[in-house]
Image (cartoon, rainbow, N blue to C red):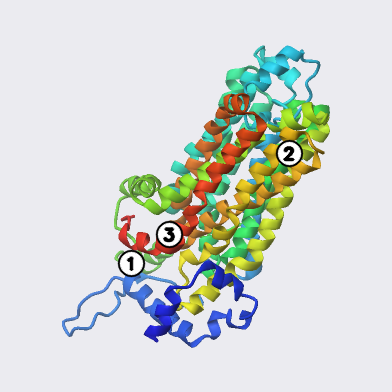
Amino acid sequence: MSQGRAEASHQTPESIISTIDKEEHCVDIANHPEEEEEGLQKAMRSITRLHSEKDNGSGQKPLDPNIVDWDGPDDPANPMNWSKFKGLGHVAFISIFTLVVLVSTIYVATGPTNGLSVETLQQSKANFSILRSTMYAPGVGELTKDFHVTDSTIGTLSVSLFLLGFAIGPLFVAPLSELYGRLPLYHTCNAIFIVFCIAAAVSTDIGMFLAFRFIAGCGGSAPLTIGGGTIADVIPQEKRGAAMALYAMGPLLGPVIGPVAGGFVAQSIGWRWTFWILSIAGGSIAIGALIFMRETYGSVLLRRKAARLRKQTGNLDLISIGDLGLSPRALFLHSIVRPLKLLLFSPIVLLLSLFAAVVFGQTFLLFTTFPTVFEEQYGFTTGTSGLSYLGMGIGMILGIITFRLLSDKILKKAALDGDGTMKPEYRLPLMVYLTPVMPIGFFWYGWSAHAQVHWIVPIIGTSFIGIGSLFVIMPIQIYLVDAFGEYAASALAANTMLRSLAGTFLPLAGPPMYKALGLGWGNSLLGFLSLGFAVVPIFFWKYGEQMRKRWVVKL
């Protein structure tokens, strides 16, 4: 047995992937004797860890009768025991709302120039931003006329402040969700996003507009931040790859769908109506969530159960598992610092979040070249320019399908070949081998655009960037979910904060970089940077478990 484990410790991502299809019949861990034994061991560890114990003087430690737990492993009140349809239904709701939020990031960017002068347009293109990636701010001419400011000012600040909300919001959303539950945060933040999209639509000056965009970004950060926590609440670890693929459809495809929709719609309906449409879409989803979604966070549900039993029985000593006995104020302060503690004291969270942030920022920096390449160089119209994002969209869809089909199988296969434990590192083989696809895409896109070959060639190059970026973002997210379990929302909050900051500020480096280096060498620089980071998943594959055990953050 020890020899088998020693051999398993030397397995590589390549060996796991190459044998998945041949040994698919071994994937079902539930039928494996070692896994059955491991399951019993896990159950005992869970009981030991979660239940308070009292020594009765005989050396035995019976469970405290005042501890409130689930009514057995099959308790229907435990969200982990929900039906597959109900669990994935909650994931789908979160994904769709995330899609609306991310669509709003770029959708409101598209719009007509309304006869702006060449000088004004060139000034705008010198101030690239994420929203500028298709055609500057919502209904550029109308905004310029309504707010009496330059188009570049609105374009840059509008998206920067919106993404800044993505960075600030998670610091409060994640810990509050672990204190009061996921559902109140979803409903509250959904309402904030919708209300302030409406407020942006009726803004009468630039100050109001920008302030409302920032607040809408804070509200819109909720599904991005605690969506992974919800998956950890309702989906067993061995099935989370498929659930994460469903969830990822929203945040990954939103910035691609936005320009395609906006390119054809915003130019005809005006910038204010883009916000009205987003509000209507968000409101429809929020109503569905109010009707169908339920609380998923186990700790909160058990606290409610304990409170209900105290009232029914009169036994004031009843407490839920994991109850720290803190006052609401102390509990809030304890929770609110959790994302920052993880970011500062967990090398795993810090390094993986930095990697995700660089990839996220690079992708949005790339978007800043699309107006110049596809509108000026290839003659795309305002409407058709949004189609230039389809290359990345197709690449991401292919990546999501691949992740959906292989991630859980690789996890189970690696666990069977090892000691039966499903380790977070077993989510990394796809990342190890597909991360290098991203620099290939940057080289392909940059030099084909530089050579001005047929427009389909650079678009194909962006599809490789889409695949590569997906296999960085998704494995990192599910790694953090698997590694931090109950506190997955706080780990993802730290990740989302750094990603959003990179998406806010890194694109500002685009204008001077591309002006100095051109499309070829400018994108090659991004490619070399991506290539350098390709060692990160290899490092975590080899040493991730050691790092998790060495740097344990007290949460």
* Amino acid tagged 3: Phe
Where in the figure is residue 240, as x and y percent of width and height?
57, 65
Q: Can residue 100 be seen?
A: no
Q: Residue 537 — which label?
A: none
Q: Residue 484 — which label?
A: 3
> Residue at (75%, 24%) from the top-left corner?
139
Looking at the image, residue 34 lies above or below residue 116: below
Pointer 3 local density, CA inside 10 Å: few below 14, some 14–19, many at least 20: some
* Quadrant of the image containing the C terminus: bottom left
Horizontal relation, residue 222 to residue 283: left or right: left
Looking at the image, residue 50 lies above or below residue 396: below
Where in the figure is residue 14, as x and y percent of width and height?
56, 68
> Residue at (42%, 51%) from the top-left corner?
349
Secondary structure at badge 2 equals helix
Foreground mark, 3 or 1, reads 3
The residue beneath circle 1 is: 318
Which residue, as the protein is rendered here, is positioned at the far left?
A: 57
Foreground mark, 2 or 1, reads 2
